Amino acid sequence: MFTPHSDYDVEVMLKSIGIEKLEDLFKEIPERFRFPGLNLPPRMTEMEASDELESIAASNGTTKDMLSFLGAGAYDHYIPAAVDMLLRRGEFYTAYTPYQPEISQGTLQAIFEYQSLICTLTGMDVSNASHYDGATAAAEAVILAWHHFRGKRGKVLVSRAVNPQYRQVIRTYMQATDNLTIAGDDAETGLDPNLDKFIAQIDNNTALVLVQYPDFFGRIVDYRPLIEAAHAQGALVAVAVNPTALGILTPPGEIGADIVVGEGQPLGIPLSFGGPYLGLFAVKEPLLRKIAGRIVGETVDVEGQLAYVLTLTAREQHIRRDKATSNICSNQGLMTLASAIYLTLLGKEGFRKLSNLCYQKAHYAAGEVSEVPGFSLAFPDQPFYHEFVVRAEQPVDEVLEHLRGHDILGGYDLGEDYPELKGCLLMAVTEKINKADINYLKGALSEVDHD
């Protein structure tokens, strides 16, 4: 291990804290744990270490090596080369939250442009500078609603068709909040897209209703009756979105949503084995001052020139733990920049075409898969975007293992989270999938043994 401190440096530091030798720093640790023997391999040269690490990495299957129909919240989209090239510029690559506007105008403007793009995409009035991922954004929506009503409304309704990971994170966030019930995602309420049982639970004690659009199963649901029912009871409505779908679907802001959250990974961010990702968060103007995290505003300086600043909330608000409504404060600066570059490169028409490609290819794939004996669509009459649920006669784990043998990531086993959907897998299709890929999938499925 390399340490930059000389023996003299160490001596001075030890003397300044009043101890004689370095080992005294660890005297509170039981002796048997202080310096355990380490079974380390022989040392390597840099070239040898590089070869070893590359060999280990090569054992991972990636979407470069395998055909991916796996989605469930993170998607394999094509990312233009310009996104990564621009991200690697030093002034962006090392940027932290821009507290000092006089030296951070580039970063501040990039975040402002990102916020503007998200507002346009979602139909909302204000976007923050993002959260960590879709799950934390969903949890922050619950926190916002709880504090909006000053804790006087004790129920949050979360649809069972919301991403299971989002629902888990919401419960983790809110587990210490007194007098708050999170409901609506039980098996009894169910997955029926008409939402009658779910809507029936909305009352004047409801702070927030959270749904997903398209839902976790890719289904496109008309949420206007639900939003009207929630607003009639004075509740807020949050909609978790797949941003790619908003290229062709009506933005949630236009159907009455108060809060929009979502996972921004599809907007120019690679899968990266799970992160870092990007939590979208936007609200209507009445909730502007309740929004957590960073917001960049546009203004003019003393000379009348266009300038950008962090606005509305100060850093200190987020670090006053006992006073703050939320302590999520750092923006995902590099990820917001990636999504802003991505959206700008595609432009309005390009993004609409991308969204439509995903839709059309998914519907072609669903039609082909449902023709294979032993496979059928679980929701055949329900409109969907670029994900759909396939019911298999054979155990799903065996189907997926068979597909992996053909270098296909076949989808997500829904039985892991939904007992009522045991035997079903969720399949996603993006613009990267072509007709030949779908035909190859169909052929591989047709070889599954149904005996």
Image (cartoon, grey):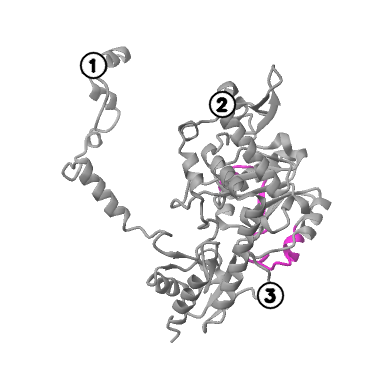
Q: Amino acid at mark 3?
A: Asp
In the rendered image, the quadrant that contains the N terminus is: top left
Along the viewing direction, whichever of 433 and 11 lies nearer the viewer: 433
Span colored in magenta: 172-201
Looking at the rendered structure, which numbered label has been put on residue 20? 1
Q: Position of residue 72 (x, y in %)?
A: 54, 60
Could you tell me how far apart the alpha carbons at marks 1 and 2 are, in whole angstroms? Answer: 45 Å
Q: Is residue 178 magenta-colored?
A: yes
Say whether residue 439 is left or right of residue 47. Answer: right
At x 57% / y 34%, what residue is drawn? Answer: 329
Could you tell me how far apart the alpha carbons at marks 2 and 3 are, in whole angstroms? Answer: 52 Å
Q: Position of residue 438 (x, y in %)?
A: 51, 72
Which residue in the rendered view is the most extreme toward the bottom?
451
Residue identified by numbered label 2: 104
Whichever of callouts 1 and 2 sits on the residue coming sooner in the sequence is: 1
Q: Amino acid at mark 2?
A: Ser
Looking at the rendered structure, which numbered label has been put on residue 381? 3
Residue 293 in view here: no
